[in-house]
Amino acid sequence: MDWGTELWDQFEVLERHTQWGLDLLDRYVKFVKERTEVEQAYAKQLRSLVKKYLPKRPAKDDPESKFSQQQSFVQILQEVNDFAGQRELVAENLSVRVCLELAKYSQEMKQERKMHFQEGRRAQQQLESGFKQLENSKRKFERDCREAEKAAQTAERLDQDINATKADVEKAKQQAHLRSHMAEESKNEYAAQLQRFNRDQSHFYFSQMPQIFDKLQDMDERRAAHLGAGYGLLSEAELQVVPIIAKCLEGMKVAADAVDAKNDSQVLIELHKSGFARPGDVEFEDFSQPMNRVPSDSSLGTPSDGRPELRGSGRSRAKRWPFGKKNKTVVTEDFSHLPPEQQRKRLQQQLEERNRELQKEVDQREALKKMKDVYEKTPQMGDPASLEPQITETLNNIERLKLEVQKYEAWLAEAESRVLSNRGDSLGRHTRPPDPPASAPPDSSSSNNSGSQDPKESSEEPLSEEGQDAPIYTEFDEDFEEESASPIGHCVAIYHFEGSSEGTISMAEGEDLSLMEEDKGDGWTRVRRKQGGEGYVPTSYLRVTLN
């Protein structure tokens, strides 16, 4: 079924319908354009949101970036940013493939429709003009017939009138004959015009207008099919980004599953553990009777120069309260403003960076040397002298980096000795011989270290062994000896360790050891060997099992 056959008399209906179809096409283009603007605004807001919450500092300078929670959050932000990029891609595809193409196609359809309806109107005008000619010839034929009949009646009346002259009768007969001839010609003209109009009308209704209507039908069907394809592009633009959006969502899920609370706790320890031990008990100072106290290394109330010290002040008090307000520290190049363990880590990081830079400069020097050799062998490739400034600069950089490496190595060795010395001091003051006598006093192993005191003073004040400059956290004599009376677990050495520093002990790979004291957060654990002897070894070298 086609419009030319079924809708041959619905010219105005087809005109309205085709105009409605083009209006619908324009409305859809406008809808997609506004949808594109929504997508672009959505993507822009998402990107602004991501930018607002992304860390401002680089990851290497931000300690928070080491926590899995922060890493997962940053990954989620990155996935949201990628998601915003996909929304921008959807907007771009809709703008190019739908808005631009359909808008252009709509203009083409409007021109084609205008051409078809102009052709139809011309055909209508031609048919109407033929019908007017037919009407004119019909009216002329009718008028001539009446005139011929009237002339014939006049001639007949004069012929019967006895008073009429022969000349009048002849004249009347000639006039009647003339009118009759004119009527016959009008009749023939009217018949010819009628035949021509019928032929034109048949061509108009059975050929010309059906062809125009069929063309309009074809145009409208092509427009509808194109519009349907445009509807499909709306979903196709979404389907194209679905796999990547699914990856973004999967990345968010992976980021959520990557949060490791235990690991974050360990990271916090690694970032902020100081290497210090907890402060010891405060000594009892008896002021109820006059006493001539000899200044000792561990005296809290009296400085070594004999002058009385104000209560509530002094270095020991400052170290005793780790939760107090910290004074503003001056950052130094050797990180001496940091606690021992943190100083050691920062120096280790700096040393590794300098070694990487040094290796890079050495590789560059070797490359320049090879290039110079090539230039010397084949001068047409380049001038060897042109490489001298770069070689000189590289050598200067190597010398500078070597000096920095030596400097950081010296600082690192000093920091490591400081950490081990804190452990060594603690070991010397807190541990007792492997098999002490049952009747030995709790501080017998440490009282011998106070060479400046006499036996009487030692027996009266058994807890004054440490000097003023020693950290107050080493005063744990009695509690320490009670804890070290028996192992709290056992452990196996995973790696060989050569305990060459004070306070440490050597162990062989696979050796079974007794666990005497757990790691306090500085990376060292106190153990006892089966052959005898106690000391500190790296916690990471052990596989520990508690009782």
Image: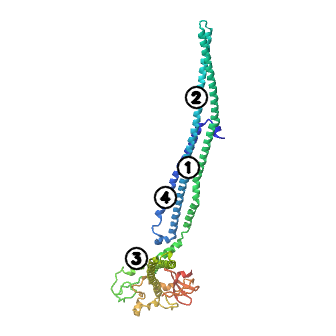
Q: In this figure, which residue is indicated by the disc labeled 2?
A: 132
Reply above or below: 187 against 301.
Answer: above
Mark 2 / mark 3, whichever is N-terminal: 2
**Disc 2 versus disc 3: nearer the observer:** 2
Q: Residue type at mark 2: give it.
A: Lys
- Mark 3–mark 4 contact, CB under 8 Å? no
Nearest to the observer: residue 2 or residue 119:
119
Q: Earlier in the sequence, mark 1 or mark 2?
A: 1
Q: Is residue 89 above or below residue 254?
A: above
Assess disc 3: are there few (<14), some (14-19) or many (≥20) residues with their C-alpha within 10 Å of its C-alpha.
Answer: few
Note whether residue 4 is visible. Answer: yes
Assign the N terminus to one quadrant of the image.
top right
Q: Tag 1, which secondary structure?
A: helix
* Amino acid on which disc 3 is placed: Val
**Above or below, 540 relative to 98:** below
Q: Earlier in the sequence, mark 4 or mark 1?
A: 4
Q: Where residue 338 sits in the image (x, y, percent)?
A: 43, 78
The residue tagged 1 is 102
Q: Which residue is mark 4?
A: 44
Tag 2's secondary structure? helix
Q: Earlier in the sequence, mark 1 or mark 3?
A: 1
Would you say 534 lies left or right of 169 here?
A: left
Residue type at numbered disc 4? Lys
Mark 4, secondary structure of its residue: helix
Which residue appears at 44% of the width and 90% of the height? 447
Say which of 387 and 392 sits in front: 387
**Nearer to us: label 4 or label 1:** 1
